[in-house]
Amino acid sequence: MDALMKQARDLILAFKGDRYAFGAGVLDQVGPLTAQIGRRALLVSRLSSPWLQPALERVQDALTKNGIQILGPVQGAAPNAPREDVYRLQGHILHKKPDVIVSLESGSGIDACKAAATLATFGDTDAELDPYFGVGEVTRRSQRTGRQVLPLVAVMTAASSSAHLTKYANITDPVKGQKKLIIDEAIVPPRAVFDYELTLTQPMSLSLDGGMDGFSHCLEVYLGAKGDTVPTIENITLLGIELIVAGLAVLAQKPAHLGAREQVALGTDLGGYAIMVGGTSGPHLNSFSLVNYLSHGRACALMNPYYTVFFTPAVEERVRKLGAIFQKHGYLDQDPAALGARELGRSVAEGILAFNRRIGFPTTLAEIEDMERDVLAKILQAAKDPQLESKLQNMPVPLNAELVDKYMAPILEAAWSGDLDKIVLR
């Protein structure tokens, strides 16, 4: 496992270079990295999270020692980055007038800061969030106005979405129970820090949820990779998947195991690298409609095996390599090299389901408390939203709005009941 971890570190260094401080014990690097960008920092964090308070004090000390004036700290966003938190943070930015934001947060909090910085920068032209959802809308406004998004130093606290490394911001409308996505190079944090030791004190549920979000990034990007990017993506994602599978299995039994924490953090960082090269697809798309019932990581984890069956005929050899990882770690009885497409997809899906059960995750929609079958119709309707079309097109079996009912509905039916035979192959 040490060799795999070294490979991961080398890949992340090649990806981000000296713009990113990562590993155990690097939190104090937030001071010099922030000083490279600005001197008036709006500090945003989860002030109500006791486990995060020692880290907040260290960040404040590091900023002060590097001559940074701290504005705040102010309360960050709730889980899933609700829209109202984005508008609230925009208000802090406009009134306090920082030249940099320092976000000591997990993925949702960093996403909210990305969106708030965007609104604060361009709000005089588009004051609502909706016009920014989709691909490249922030860049279009930057080119039109000559402005750059207020810079963000993202200090990640959880091995999860890798929001500190990426061009994505997931924002939730709590009234509709629906997430939407900003996808834009213009919102990538120019500096980032992730001290892997911070994950030792977080709630175990957050560790597991975040790990499976990173797993889903790797899995969806790998299966959907196209063209010249395939070799690069395969190198990143299979390594990330193996680190996360190995690390989470240990953490489920030994939460204080630092080596396993580092494996999961490296794996989820590779997931962030992956979604900068490729894109996520069906499981992430469906998870956006499940915010009222499941955390993001659990929603993606639940959908992964069912989409794997659907995707396998189009990417059979990739699923074989995926299956070899699950076989190596004891979740597959059959040798994936000997299986045909339909049997292969089913076998690997069963391996993913076995892993989900190992870490205590649900494996069907029907077992989720308070969930009713009419949620399936809502998921299908959301999948037809043009602002989320990129997720359909990222699939190895691309769909459009007209094909959603024919092919996605059976996948959801399978996920509801656990019956893999309900899935209709295209």
Image (cartoon, rainbow, N blue to C red):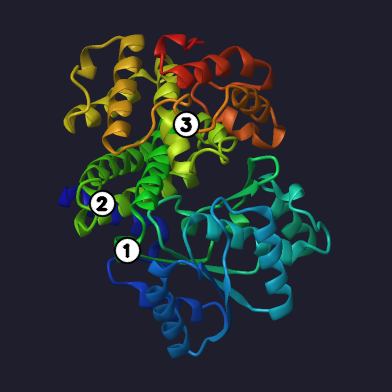
Q: Is residue 114 left or right of residue 275?
A: right
How much space separates mark 3 and mark 2, taking CA atoms? 29 Å
The residue identified by callout 2 is 263
Q: Quadrant of residue 142?
A: bottom right
Nearer the observer, 394 or 129: 129
The residue identified by callout 3 is 368
Nearer the observer, 155 or 204: 204
Query: Percent position (x, y) of residue 386?
Result: 71, 32
- Which residue lies at the image location 60% right of the left edge and 58% below the top edge? 112
- Which residue lies at the image location 57% right of the left edge and 40% below the top edge? 292
Vertical order, 67 against 419 (above or below): below
2 and 1 marks in contact (CB < 8 Å)? no
Few, some or many residues within 10 Å of mark 1 (<14, 14–19, 20+): some
Vertical order, 339 against 189 (above or below): above
Please tell me which of labels 3 and 1 falls first in the chain. Answer: 1
Query: Percent position (x, y) of residue 389?
Result: 65, 32
How much space separates mark 2 and mark 1, taking CA atoms? 16 Å
Few, some or many residues within 10 Å of mark 3 (<14, 14–19, 20+): few
How much space separates mark 3 and mark 1, taking CA atoms? 27 Å
3 and 2 marks in contact (CB < 8 Å)? no
Q: Secondary structure at mark 1?
A: helix
Report whether residue 221 is seen: no
Q: Amino acid at mark 2?
A: Gln
